Amino acid sequence: MTDLTLRFAFLTEACRLKSVSRANVLMDLSRPENSAEHSWHVALYALVFGASDRAVAMLLVHDLVEIDCGDHPIHLAHDGPAVQAAEDAAARRLFAMLPGGEALMALWQEFEAGESPDARMAKRMDHAQPLFQVLCARQPLADHVAIVRDNMTAGRARRLWVEWPEAMEAAQALLDGRAPCGELAQRLEFLAEADRLKSVLRASLLCDGSRRENSAEHSWHLALYALVMAPHAGPAVDIGRVIRMLLIHDLVEIDAGDVPIHAQGGGAHHGAAQLQAEAEAAERIFGLLPVSQGAELHALWAEFEANETPDAVFAKSLDRAQPVMQNIASGGGSWAEYRVTYEQLVERVGLRIERGAPALWSWLSESAQVYFIARTGG
């Protein structure tokens, strides 16, 4: 098999993480959180709280083993050595699918060991996000609040009183019914608002065709695409910046919603009204952050939208490539729903992918044609 065949196979397998449920629930209490959208949210936490690109990359891959092993809630008893052995086996299986997968395997192992500065930072985000997922909800569940309280006093989060006392003081304030203050409170408000992206549905189906994808898990999958497809980026592309772009690129959909590219109007789906709605959403959402940081992330989002720099062009190419792969894997997906022709696919999607990642479009085009030829019988 070719290099790209193996990379796309790994990314298709990674899509299964979207079907792994966690004990945490969304902040609106509507359903359990899944491990893919959790991975996106934790990576966004890392971005907001100043983690390195390596720490962010760790968080993109840290829960992939749950595809095989499932999630193990911290408040339940587990056989630690057995869980670790199962996760080690899962990591070996998954990363062996990928050309050069040894590098991601080493990154995952570094995260698990939790000893390097990047791993400690990533662990800090992974252990703090579930606390605030509960405490920043408008009506936290009483049993979840009890789990958080125990976690802060006697569980894995206890060490954060030493490692990150400001966050723990904010958590304690929320437990006591008080509002945190300062820039940390602004960042927490932004991250709580970001949770709403998990409820924005897209036209794309998961690779197994079981349901529609949401924009948060899509953002995680795209960031993973950037990490995995880095060897196919141009020499001027900074993959760390691309990943950061992709983590935030769809936040405006919290207000503006997702507009399927193959819906009525096709490639012209981003009309003036939609663009205005997204611009206003960006002002509001990034405006929740401290001023300088909000301006920085707003500028990164605007760079992605303008699609002119090497980083933005590659990021846009991936944003178009991932749904193509999901439609191939799901047997047509949104193509069947919207009666898309191959010519429309090329016009609306292919040219954008080819601009930033020609090798990816060559592979996807050949694979997509199998579907379109089978559908037309010619």
Image (cartoon, rainbow, N blue to C red):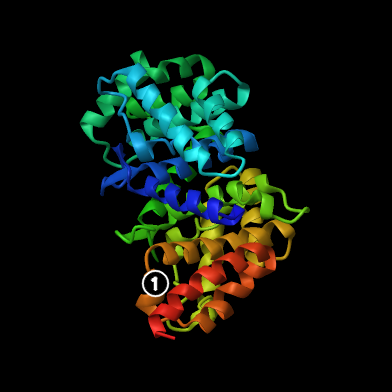
Q: Which of 222 and 89 lies nearest the eye of the viewer? A: 89
Question: Where on the picture, by quarter, is residue 275?
Answer: bottom right
The secondary structure type at the circle numbered 1 is helix
Q: Which of 370 and 59 lies nearest the eye of the viewer? A: 370
Identified at 49% across, 66% down, the residue is 324
Amino acid at circle 1: Ser
Residue 21 location in percent, x, y?
Answer: 30, 42
Considering the image in quadrants, where does the C terminus appear?
bottom left
- Within 10 Å of disc 1 (Cα), the crowding (few <14, some 14-19, many 20+) is many
Vertical order, 378 against 246 (above or below): below
Vertical order, 63 against 258 (above or below): above
Considering the image in quadrants, where does the N terminus appear?
bottom right
Residue 281 location in percent, x, y?
Answer: 51, 61
Question: Where on the picture, by quarter, is residue 204?
Answer: bottom left
User: Quick check: can you spot residue 186?
Assistant: no
User: Quick check: can you spot residue 370?
Assistant: yes
Residue that lies at the very extreme toward the right in this rendered image: 236
Residue that lies at the very extreme toward the front in this rendered image: 1
Identified at 42% across, 54% down, the residue is 197
Using residue 252 as the reference point, say whether residue 2 is left or right of it.
Answer: right
Residue 53 location in percent, x, y?
Answer: 64, 38
Question: Where on the picture, by quarter, is residue 309?
Answer: bottom right
Identified at 58% across, 80% down, the residue is 347
Using residue 19 as the reference point, say whether residue 293 is left or right of it.
Answer: right
Residue located beneath label 1 in the image: 334
